Image (cartoon, coloured by chain):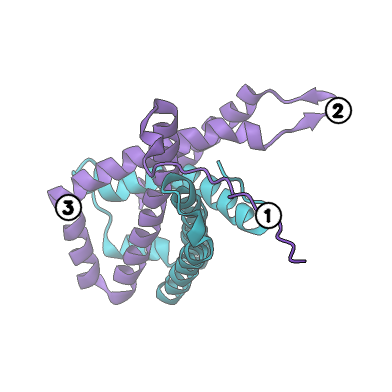
Amino acid sequence: MAYTLHHPKWHRDSKPIFWWVRNWASIAFILRELTSVAVAYFAVLLILVYRALQSGPEAWAALVSMLANPTMIAFHVFALCTLLYHSITWFNLSPKAIVIRLGRWRIPDLLIAGGNYAAWIFISAMIALAYVAS
Amino acid sequence: MNKSNDPFWWTLFGAGGALSAMLVPILLFLIGVATPLGWIDAPSYAAVSGLMLHPIVRIAAFSLISLSFFHWAHRFRFTLYDGLQLKHLFQLIAVICYGGALAGSIAAAYVIW
């Protein structure tokens, strides 16, 4: 006798593509994830800097004038805002990922985030000084 | 969020996220905004190449570039999965994202050295 397994239809969530547009929290989440595009863009820019430096002074001058184009400056201001959002969200979330305990005392989130910000300011100042002095 | 259980990719993602969060805003501000607007005098070619072609700076720049790409690959991958509901393209997206990061790293190594 033929035996047929009972096979109910699978349940599948059908979520619309733009599900995240409905509330601010999920928009902020998607924007935070998209900051990674700006991070990758900067990596490309740094490769272009090296290519120009390795090619010689003319190539460097061409890159410098390209960077001075108003459209490029406007784009870089936008990219900079995106990257600041990346840094701030990263530093604020890191206490959730890094839990440090000294004996039974858990180092509070605020201290870890504060340490991040202090390191950020210090490193940025050092880079700026090295750049201006060069 | 769809958390990846793969500690290898997550480690690259985390290292790239931390390094870029610390270093990239000031670098982009100096190179892309302050210098072109004339707030800071543009350093000479000799000064910039002397600094950037120093062996230690090359290694640091390569690390920053490569880890930034892998940071992007991991985040962008899950943004495509979750944001655009493309979970059925799981393998294709993973290959494109991590493959792109690998190709970018190789290109960086080639250009830097």
Write down the residue under mark 3.
Answer: A68
- Residue nearest the observer in this picture, A39 or B79: B79
Q: Quadrant location of residue A57? A: bottom left
Residue furthest out toward the left: A70
Tag 3–tag 1 contact (CB < 8 Å): no
Between B89 and B12, the one nearer to me in the picture = B89
Which residue in the protein does label 1 denote? B7
- Residue sitting at 46 percent across and 38 percent down? A87
> Of circles 3 and 2, which is in front?
2
Q: Which residue is mark 2?
A: A103
The quadrant of the rendering that contains the C terminus of chain B is bottom left
Identify residue type, mark 3. Ala
Query: Horizontally, is A22 left or right of A68 in the view?
Result: right
Q: CA distance from mark 1 to mark 2?
A: 27 Å
Q: Quadrant of the N terminus of chain B?
A: top right
| Label 1–label 2 contact, CB within 8 A | no
Q: Does dot 3 land on a helix, a strand or a loop? A: loop
Residue A121 located left or right of residue A51: right
Residue B11 spot, x, y in % from top left: 63, 53
Which chain has been coloured purple in this picture? Answer: A
Task: Name above or below for residue B37 compared with residue A25.
Answer: below
Which of discs 3 and 1 lies nearer the camera? The answer is: 1
Return the chain for callout 2. Answer: A
Q: CA distance from mark 3 to mark 2?
A: 54 Å
The number of numbered discs placed on residues in the rendered structure image is 3
Regarding residue A125, the answer to whether it shows in the image is: no
Note whether residue B32 is visible: yes
